[in-house]
């Protein structure tokens, strides 16, 4: 117990020192460096703040970081997104800028609007049912405008966001996988069918295990979909697949970052929705992000066709003890159907092989399983679809 307390004190001191090094200026001084602007595209006008690197030299090019705030920072004041969570300020610190000078863009979503028009409490969503919002369309047009005005390195465009902005981050990279060099979504959700488009996208994903606003399953399902798109993942805090809750040693994480790990997942045990303060304070995050550059393959990436399958679902749901999974294929393809537990571990495989176009029905009998949440996972060479099932006995 004494050793544990000493370790806790040492860890706290180490974190404090890391944060102190990373954040050398006051928030007020940093915020004053951001220009106040607005951008109009079609019928939408967004206020935004822009950080221009000190000693900006138009003869060279600079990275750009797009930051998307959460629901609580919506408005028209062009102030709140900078004051909350250090979402944009963290990248403007003089020490970080001295090593990685970059532009920082902090747009503000208007009141009662969303970066992505979906119900956050449901986790994942479908791009086929949710069109791009006018706000995100305006953000993309803003990036084009800034690239014309300033010397922006279009191979080093980065995006990060939290909560509602986490959804916005996922939405942008799945709709425009050829535009961004890397992304850092926090406490958000995405369309798992779009994972194939992110095969070449460096990602560091964050979520809290006890998140009551956006279920942690939203990030887990996307990680699973990425894993089935031939991605390897580094679990830095908690591996839900094995149930292992051991924080990766700082030296090991530094080594992973040094070797440019393309996909990292940080899930905090015992923490809920608001996990961005400690996440943006991780010293390795900035090192990892600025090391990323859009590859030729990523620049040519295209959004995969997502009309191969109609939305899959199971009925009844909740169920006891059996349920039927229904889905429709629009072309002949290889299909595997797995049942997963809440930890993402495969329990049983219901189907594996080539299936013809048309409607399909697969029955799942859970008579030997305890009550709880389960997932079905439908895998093809082009996409991965997940669905949540509730067994109530």
Image (spheres, rainbow, N blue to C red):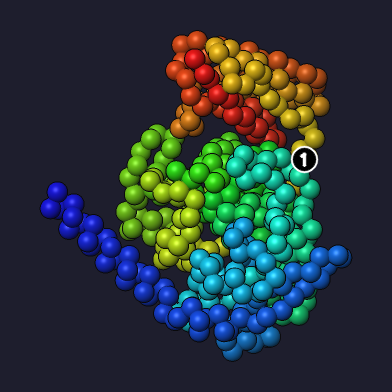
For the residue pair 48 and 172, the one nearer the viewer reads as 48
Q: Give the residue at x 53% y 77%.
A: 92
Note whether 332 is above or below 267 in the view shown.
above
Residue 139 in which image quadrant: bottom right
Q: Position of residue 350 (x, y in %)?
A: 59, 16
Residue 73 in which image quadrant: bottom right
* 42 sits to left or right of 197: right
Q: Is residue 223 visible?
A: no
Residue sticking out furthest to the left: 2
Q: Give the residue at x 65% y 17%.
A: 316
Give the residue number, with chain letter if any, for mark 1. Answer: 129
Note whether 26 is above or below 175 in the view shown.
below
Q: Give the residue at x 77% y 40%.
A: 129
Note whether 103 is above or below 168 in the view shown.
below
Residue sticking out furthest to the bottom: 55
Q: Position of residue 199 (x, y in %)?
A: 63, 46
* Circle 1 crowding by C-alpha within 10 Å: few under 14, some 14–19, many from 20: few
Q: Position of residue 62 (x, y in %)?
A: 63, 76
So how many labels did they put on this image?
1
Q: Give the residue at x 54% y 41%.
A: 215
Q: Secondary structure at mark 1?
A: loop
Q: Is residue 132 visible?
A: yes
């Amino acid at each position: 117990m004494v050793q544990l307390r000493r370790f806790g004190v040492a860890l706290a001191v180490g974190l404090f020192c890391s944060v102190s090094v990373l954040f050398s200026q006051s928030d007020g001084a940093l915020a004053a460096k951001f220009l106040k602007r607005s951008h109009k595209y079609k019928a939408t006008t967004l206020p935004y703040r822009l950080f221009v690197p000190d000693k900006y030299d138009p003869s060279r090019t600079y990275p750009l970081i797009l930051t998307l705030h959460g629901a609580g920072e919506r408005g028209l004041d062009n102030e709140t997104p900078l004051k909350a969570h250090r979402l944009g300020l963290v990248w403007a610190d003089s020490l970080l800028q001295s090593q990685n000078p970059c532009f920082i863009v902090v747009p503000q979503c208007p009141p009662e609007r969303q970066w992505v028009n979906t119900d956050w409490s449901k986790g994942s969503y479908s791009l086929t049912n949710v069109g791009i919002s006018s706000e995100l369309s305006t953000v993309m047009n803003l990036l084009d405008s800034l690239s014309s005005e300033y010397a922006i390195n279009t191979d080093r465009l980065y995006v990060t966001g939290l909560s509602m902005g986490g959804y916005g981050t996922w939405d942008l990279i799945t709709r425009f996988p050829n535009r961004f060099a890397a992304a850092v979504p926090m406490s958000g959700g995405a369309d798992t069918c779009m994972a194939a488009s992110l095969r070449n996208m460096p990602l560091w994903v964050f979520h809290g295990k006890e998140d009551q606003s956006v279920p942690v399953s939203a990030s887990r399902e996307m990680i699973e979909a990425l894993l089935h798109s031939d991605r390897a993942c580094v679990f830095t805090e908690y591996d839900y697949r094995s149930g292992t809750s051991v924080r990766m040693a700082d030296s090991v994480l530094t080594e992973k970052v040094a070797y440019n790990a393309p996909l990292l997942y940080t899930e905090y045990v015992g923490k809920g929705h608001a996990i961005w303060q400690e996440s943006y304070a991780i010293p390795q995050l900035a090192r990892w992000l600025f090391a990323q550059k859009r590859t030729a393959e990523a620049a040519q990436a295209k959004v995969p066709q997502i009309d191969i399958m109609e939305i899959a679902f199971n009925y009844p749901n909740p169920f006891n003890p059996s349920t039927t999974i229904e889905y429709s294929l629009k072309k002949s393809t290889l299909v595997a159907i797995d049942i997963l537990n809440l930890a993402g571990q495969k329990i049983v495989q219901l189907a594996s092989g080539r299936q013809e176009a048309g409607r399909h029905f697969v029955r799942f009998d859970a008579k030997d399983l305890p009550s709880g949440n389960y997932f079905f996972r439908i895998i093809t060479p082009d996409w991965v679809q997940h669905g949540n099932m509730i067994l109530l006995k």
